[in-house]
Amino acid sequence: VKPMLERLGAKVWDPSKVVVITDHYVPTYDDESRKIIRIARDWVREAGIDNFYDEQGICHVVLPERGHLRPGMFAVGGDSHSPTGGAFAAYMFGVGATEMLGVLVTGEIWLKVPHTIAMDFAGRLQAGVSAKDIMLFLIGRFGLDGGQYQAVEYRGVAIRALPMQERMTLCNMTAELGGQTGLISSDQVTKEFLKLPDQETWESDADAPLLAHHCFDATELAPQVAAPHSPANTKAVTEFRDVKPTLAYIGACTGAKLEDLRMASLVLKGRKARMRLVVAPASLRDQKAAENEGTLEVLQDAGAEFLGLGCGICAGYGGNVLGEDVVAISSTARNFKGRMGAASSQVYLASPYTVAATAVAGHICDPREMLQ
Amino acid sequence: VRAWVLGDDIDTDVIVPGRTMKFGIEEIAKHCLEAVSPGFSRKIKPGDFLVAGRNFGCGSSREQAPAALKHLGVAALVAQSFAGLFYRNALNLGLAALVCAEAKRIRDGDRLELDFHRSTIANLTTGENLPFEPIPEHLMEMVRDGGLLPHLEKRLKCRTTS
């Protein structure tokens, strides 16, 4: 962005409306990544941007955690998982670097007014089943373009019952479902998370037209697993009993928030991992909260190794990417060929519950068995 | 100029691997599509077309995906559908992305010719004419300018002179 701004001789239209967060190239691991982060730090200072969070965690988690999102906002992010912001009833979507430059210079962007696709979940998720399972199920059912680049709205009592960070996982993986954004109406849970004073609720009009309305019963949903090399390659966890991963990974904006670490710890409490178990918490605040409440200790006692804050293995960055022929089970969002390392590596996607249960069992395992 | 045909759901990690993102576009482009079409970056010639099925470019927001294709000289992308984020990125870089419902009728190696006025792709190998959805005018103007950056440059210049 910096050289493009210079070429235009333009300034940031409103530095108070810009938030910069380092996540993809931290912790720095070589000369190139150190250079990229140095450019970012220098530019933020020059451009007069006060909202800068350096090595505090992944942007989609840090942004709401530091109170930068509000229901009713219109926002864009420089990463495809930006629909995460929709969990706060903000219309948020991802853009590339050049388009972000356009926003930085003009404060404007074009948008085709989207249709709404409603995903309605009645009932209540069983213990050991999570938002991640809902998304893997939906992506398996409707495909990587099921969202048709429209607004996907998650509703129903099962969604209302979810804590804020689980709602974030739903909207986050709307990227894999192919929606422009994922949306959830704001309510008491939203207000408490953002520490908002009582204010109006943002929700769809009752008579708003829908492009599609899909209804499901959350109570019937089993934990889901997506086999290599697509998040749409999904089946119930019980179909994968013969798969024996060599690495279990809990990481990323999708799968290593405080709520995700808690899920893993429920399974791992008093148990030991039988394979390499790697945990990279999604934000510094979540990591500290997990430490204070004892969640991290449970993971550590189970044999987990911890990596630094950042996108890390999920984005294929850093020194810990998957080697040749590694079979991994991961709480992240994407298992495209070669994304997390070697093209010969195989990544199975699952919830933090299922990743933890698999680490303990030595093969892909239904976490409900361990939560009884 | 010929068509290079790919399948459905070609993702950005396949178009340009994440491990190459820290490098410049020249190096990134060398690895373009190598996981599904080994040697692609050496085989493709400037002016060639890339043709795909549904949801081309799904996955990340990385602009290096269309940038690498443009760097290799791809004249235009033709697909049954594009992932929204990739579509925006391609146009923002001045690379035409054409939605053609019948893209699957094009075979690998076919010779193609574009007609923007009539919004059709002429397949010179088979003699077929395939319609594509016209790109909205405000976006086409940007593509003609060479992408969002030169387009903004023009706009800002007009503003200072007027």
Image (cartoon, coloured by chain):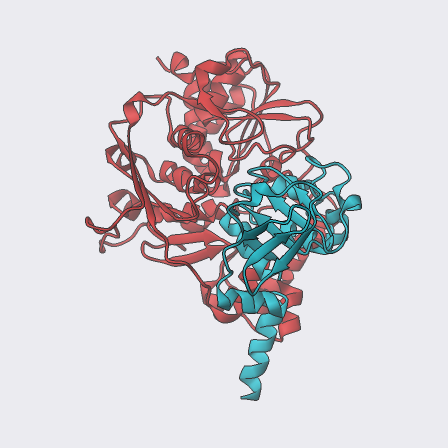
Report which quarter residue B105 is drawn in: top right
Report which quarter residue A305 is drawn in: top right
Chain B, hue in figure? cyan
Q: Residue furthest right?
A: B42
State whether residue B124 is above or below residue A239: below
Return the x and y of residue A297 as percentages of the image width and height: 49, 25
> Which one is in front, A259 or A219?
A219
Question: Is there any visible trace of residue A310 in the rendered image?
Answer: no
Q: Residue furthest bottom?
A: B162
Asked whether, in this view, residue B38 is left or right of residue A41, the answer is right
Return the x and y of residue B27 as percentages of the image width and height: 77, 49
Tag count: 0
Asked whether, in this view, residue B149 is left or right of residue A64, the answer is right
> Which one is in front, A211 or A344?
A211
State whether residue A62 is above or below residue A267: below
> Which one is in front, B46 or B20?
B46
Q: Which chain's colour is red? A: A
Residue drawn at x 25%, y 36% is A156
Return the x and y of residue B72 as percentages of the image width and height: 74, 52
Residue drawn at x 31%, y 46% is A211
Give the quarter of the figure containing the N terminus of chain A. Answer: bottom right
Give the quarter of the figure containing the C terminus of chain A. Answer: top left
